[in-house]
Image (cartoon, helix red, strand yellow):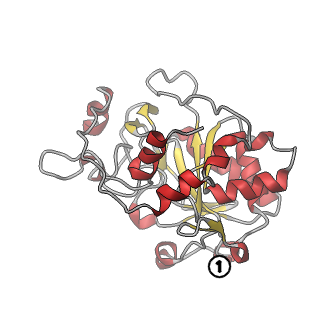
Amino acid sequence: MFTRKIASLLLGGAIAAAGPAAAGPAGGNPWEEVGQPSTLSPASIGTYTNGCLSGARQMPLRGEGFQLVRTGRDRHYGHPETVSFLEDFSRRVARQDLGRLQIGDMSMARGGPFSSGHRSHQVGLDVDIWYSQDRRAGKRALTAWERDNISAIPMADTEQHRLIEKNWDERIPSILRIAAEDERVERIFVHPTIKRKMCNMAGSDNEWLRKVRPWWGHNYHFHVRLACPEGEANCKPQRPPRGAPCGSDLDWWFSDEFYALLRAPEEPAPKKKPRPMPEQCARVLTAP
């Protein structure tokens, strides 16, 4: 069961998708100023929320079962294993007649912290995938304008903390199960109401939901996180998921304690000193 202190941290910023990143000496973010991957060997360095990425691959604009969206952000780089996973995953989704995925933010060309939008996505092993599938994307290649301007459809109401039933897509559990049963996947983050719906639908056949974790803010996309690639000693893994697939950690998100925190006046998060990045990241940032 979550304590009040942990819950406060979750709602006070640690759980949020957006947050300030470490800035350079002049107030800018040097990681956002590098537009090409390094020529170093592929490696995820550090933790998901404090690290970098060498030898990244850029995700293709489109392929079997997927198209990229929000390409103007230039956040479609990943560890080569992430790109391979996404191509495999999308192919399986397409061949099971589950539509064409729309892939949003991954990492920047050399990973590292964002100025806004994410606290994680720093080591090339995180990717956001929209729940909704634009009909145009299922029939043809999106134009550059469409990729940056089509809207995702929310599946959950973040203010009322409930599912938007009229928007629910019956393909979602099947798509998420394909990802969850892939041994490369470490976590899948979804809005708590979406996890609850899938638990109710799955019944006793719910072991695959162990990796699917309730997490605030994921109402229009699900977040896939891959495990550290084998043999990469500088990549810091997460602990394996604990508890039952549909247990008490899910119940907390619908408790009186949670709702009290949800409705409490928002307080400014305390300023924190930027954490030092792994030493190897200085070389990644400056490498050709």
Q: Position of residue 217 (x, y in %)?
A: 52, 59
Location of residue 101 by image quarter: bottom right
Instruction: Say which element carries label 1.
Output: helix
* Placement of 24 over or under 155, stated as above or below: above
Q: Is residue 142 left or right of residue 280?
A: right
- In the rendered image, the quadrant that contains the C terminus is top left
Q: Position of residue 77 (x, y in %)?
A: 46, 49
* Placement of 146 over or under 159, stated as above or below: below
Q: Please tell me which residue is depicted at 47% across the width and 67% down the height of the picture.
A: 70
* Placement of 59 over or under 245, stated as above or below: below
Tell me, yes or no, if residue 261 can be seen here.
Answer: yes
Q: Residue furthest right?
A: 204
Q: Residue furthest left?
A: 26
Q: Position of residue 261 (x, y in %)?
A: 47, 55
Q: Is residue 130 left or right of residue 118?
A: right
Q: Please tell me which residue is depicted at 34% across the width and 46% down the height of the picture.
A: 113
Q: Is residue 188 left or right of residue 48?
A: right
Q: Is residue 92 left or right of residue 5?
A: right
Local packing at callout 1 (Cα closer than 10 Å; few below 14, some 14-19, many 20+) is: few
The mark total stands at 1
Q: Please tell me which residue is depicted at 45% across the width and 54% down the height of the picture.
A: 17
Q: Given the image, on which type of amino acid does mark 1 rest?
A: Arg
- In the rendered image, the quadrant that contains the N terminus is top right
Tell me, yes or no, if residue 108 can be seen here.
Answer: no
Location of residue 117 by image quarter: bottom left
Q: Position of residue 206 (x, y in %)?
A: 81, 44
Query: Closest to the observer: 112 or 197?
Result: 197
Q: Please tell me which residue is depicted at 65% across the width and 36% down the height of the picture.
A: 184
Residue on which disc 1 sits = 136
Query: Closest to the observer: 72 or 129?
Result: 129
